[in-house]
Image (spheres, rainbow, N blue to C red):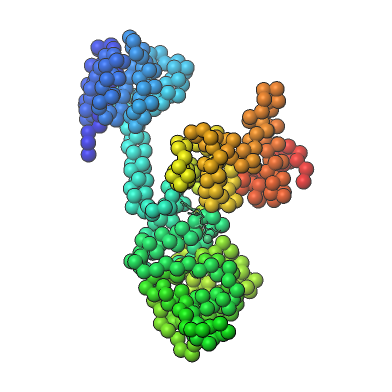
Amino acid sequence: MKQTQILIVEDDVKMRTALREIMFKEGYSVETVGTGEAALAKIGTTNYDLVITDLKLPGIDGMDILKAIRKSRPEISTVMITAYATVDTAVEAMKEGAEDYIAKPFNLDEIRIIVKKVLERKALVDDNKLLRSQLKKKYSYENVVGNSEGMIDVYKTIDRVKDSKATVLILGETGTGKELVARAIHYNSIRSEKPFLPVNCGALAESLLESELFGYVKGAFTGAARDKQGVFEVADGGTVFLDEIGDISARLQQVLLRVLENGEIQPVGATTRKKVDVRIVAATNKNLEEMIKTGSYREDLYYRLNVITLRLPPLRERREDIATLAGHFLRKYCANNEKAITGLSKEVLRLLEQYAWPGNVRELENLIERATLLETTSEITRESLPEHIRTATDKGLLANDEDLQTLEEMGRAYIIKVLGKVNGNKVRASEILGINRTSLWRMIQRFKISE
Ligand SMILES: Nc1ncnc2c1ncn2[C@@H]1O[C@H](COP(=O)(O)OP(=O)(O)OP(=O)(O)O)[C@@H](O)[C@H]1O
Ligand SMILES: [Mg+2]
């Protein structure tokens, strides 16, 4: 492990020597300088772990050094030394990013402990960052964007199951990326050279779906002029993606169950069965467990499909991915449309991060595509957002000075607005507001909001 490097900035020679001695005895590699100017020159060229600086220096002072570090070398930790620390200087130093401060006169133990604590905290943060980036590298899938914990779990599961033949059931609200993840499983598996064939089970009538899946023989029905293979045969060695698997009829549920049980299909009109080698990935945004309870879905089929479950979290539960996804789609649609937009304005990002995203990633993608086309400046601005997102904080936050409101008034108005949008549904409203239902209920009482 590399030795910890510390820079001490102190104009008082006695103090400087004393500090160097203590830090050296603690086993750190120490350098010292007497002016802010010399400090900045060193910081620009050496990878220090920690800079301990006196506040008062001739010329460039400690506060300037803090600012410079925060701006250009934010990975360096800082500790400020202040004579007769007043609360004000300490607070200001912390605001500028100092991790801690030492008040003169100090004793040696005190400074040892503070430095140790700051370095430990830094090591922890560095470790976490490293871990995150390693995980991300290990479990990243082309086109699938997002580093939230929820998505890292998804990558881990894909990684664990991609090469097995076990059936995967992907669950998630509309637009959360079920089809995208199904493709990622296939194209990263040992089957990737063989076909990936998606079938939308919700879009076809029962008889059409059956012949699409399993094929038919000549003469099976009017119009069946010759034998035709179904996707299960065409995909031999590859993957069949059964999308909207909650939408298949009771009879097809039974047929599919048999296929899953013995790996054989029977084309429509055929008298014999055929062995097939396909991996099945299925997806639905329906609640199959509920459907089992009401008798509209076969429990045995559910267990066959659900060997491995992959749940895709809704976007509102991983808001930290919104900025990354928005940037990804911005680059995509700028390239498609030959536009040169460099980013999103802070205000736009804030609006996007607050929004509830009922249509999840698909809704975000559509929004960015539209905004890319509409935008006339070099940055996506609020004007290019659709009305319902643009006005989310219009009243209140962005009002004229004359009608500035108190937080209470604004909170009340916003709750009423959200309740209106979800037709009074308190569960949805509390999700959007990011508070639990009891808190919402209390606010409704307190603000005297009528049903
Ligand atoms: N994590 C992600 N990274 C990048 N793009 C994503 C991500 N998740 C979803 N998308 C994009 O969002 C759109 C919707 O994704 P997809 O079609 O996979 O959703 P779905 O869950 O199948 O939705 P539905 O239930 O409505 O069919 C696609 O264009 C997809 O590429
Ligand atoms: Mg889909």
Q: Is residue 67 above or below residue 345?
A: above
Furthest residue toward right = 450
Residue 315 seen: no
Nearer to us in this view, 48 or 220:
220
Residue occupying image coordinates x 65% and y 71%: 294
Image quadrant in which the N terminus is located? top left
Residue occupying image coordinates x 63% and y 35%: 393
Q: Is residue 101 above or below residue 263?
A: above
Q: Quadrant of residue 133?
A: top left
Query: How far across and down, in percent of the image, does residue 363 sit?
Result: 56, 50
Residue 215 seen: yes
Q: How many marks?
A: 0
Q: Quadrant of residue 439?
A: top right
Query: How far across and down, in percent of the image, does residue 50 sit?
Result: 31, 27
Furthest residue toward bottom = 271
Residue occupying image coordinates x 45% and y 68%: 197
Residue occupying image coordinates x 65% and y 50%: 428
Nearer to us in this view, 141 or 369:
369
Furthest residue toward top = 58
Query: How far across and down, in percent of the image, does residue 33 sit?
Result: 25, 17
**Residue 57 appears left or right of 367:** left
Q: Quadrant of residue 119?
A: top left
Q: Is residue 87 above or below residue 160?
A: above
Query: How far across and down, in percent of the image, does residue 199 sit?
Result: 50, 69
Nearer to us in this view, 425 or 279:
279
